[in-house]
């Protein structure tokens, strides 16, 4: 997605070896016009797939996921990282290990929002090692729902998230694919949409 790549080049900052800071438009301040465009691109790709739910994980997946849900005219569900006192029954959970933060957290979704007829599109802001998306796939499968794909805004292709998800038989669509950060320079490879 050219518009997204341009925005990353203009407003993204490389931190250390392998972190891209995009808090200006995606992970803190959010550009809703760009999110709306992103929503349209994913919705176009999955227009004929019969998607019934969009699933993401809090916090930064919520903005793009909501616009995908709007464009597909289906509900958006975000997995919670902290158990809420109102989540009392039928909770589906998965353990997610973050290589970046070196902690394992329990993520959860109320089972009442997913059922065996659901066809799910997972959306997330970043794909690094794929652990968050893998946890979401586990939860969706516990509900008996089908995962039809994972849509990613920014993939760091030098990490192994895509390989992990494809090894689980799930299609990955990334709007920007970062090949590497070389000498402070960001290089893209061809994106999926
Ligand atoms: P993984 O799910 O692909 O395995 O990712 P990993 O554990 O490595 O990443 C943990 C968190 O760091 C995730 O957000 C992920 O989106 C984010 N992250 C990974 N690489 C980058 C990067 O290069 N830039 C930025 N800005 N974020 C990155 P999170 O902890 O769930 O945060 P949030 O969504 O609550 O903000």
Image (tube, helix red, strand yellow):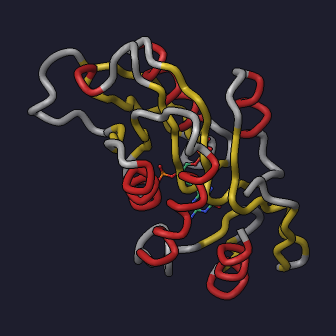
Q: Is residue 63 left or right of residue 2?
A: left
Q: Position of residue 112 (x, y in %)?
A: 23, 21
Q: Nearer the viewer, residue 110 or 146?
A: 146
Q: Quadrant of residue 178?
A: bottom right
68 up-or-down from 48: above or below: below
Q: Nearer the viewer, residue 42 or 143?
A: 42
Q: How many marks?
A: 0
Q: Position of residue 65 (x, y in %)?
A: 44, 52
Q: Is residue 110 left or right of residue 115?
A: left
Q: Nearer the viewer, residue 132 or 74?
A: 74
Q: Quadrant of the N terminus?
A: bottom right
Q: Nearer the viewer, residue 82 or 155?
A: 155
**Which residue is depicted at the point 35% across and 43% down?**
74
Q: Quadrant of the C terminus?
A: bottom right
Q: Residue furthest front?
A: 48
Q: Is residue 161 left or right of residue 113?
A: right
**Which residue is depicted at the point 23% across and 33% down?**
83
**Which residue is depicted at the point 85% across and 79% down?**
185
Q: Is residue 72 left or right of residue 193?
A: left
**Which residue is depicted at the point 52% across and 75% down?**
34
Q: Position of residue 66 (x, y in %)?
A: 38, 55
């Amino acid at each position: 997605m050219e518009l997204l790549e341009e925005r990353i080049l203009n407003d993204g900052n490389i931190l250390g070896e392998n972190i891209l800071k995009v808090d200006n438009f995606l992970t803190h301040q959010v550009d809703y016009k760009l999110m709306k465009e992103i929503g349209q691109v994913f919705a176009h790709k999955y227009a004929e797939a019969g998607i019934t739910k969009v699933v993401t994980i809090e916090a930064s997946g919520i903005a793009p996921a909501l616009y995908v849900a709007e464009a597909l005219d289906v509900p958006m569900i975000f997995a919670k990282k902290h158990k809420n006192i109102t989540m009392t029954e039928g909770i589906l959970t998965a353990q997610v290990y973050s290589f970046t933060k070196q902690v394992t957290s329990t993520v959860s979704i109320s089972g009442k929002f997913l059922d065996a007829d659901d066809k799910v599109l997972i959306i997330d802001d970043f794909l690094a090692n794929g652990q968050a998306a893998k946890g979401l796939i586990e939860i969706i499968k516990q509900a008996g729902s089908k995962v039809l794909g994972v849509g990613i805004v920014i993939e760091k292709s030098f990490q192994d998230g895509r390989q992990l998800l494809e090894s689980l038989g799930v299609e990955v669509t990334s709007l920007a694919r970062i090949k590497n950060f070389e000498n402070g320079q960001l290089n893209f490879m061809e994106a999926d949409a």
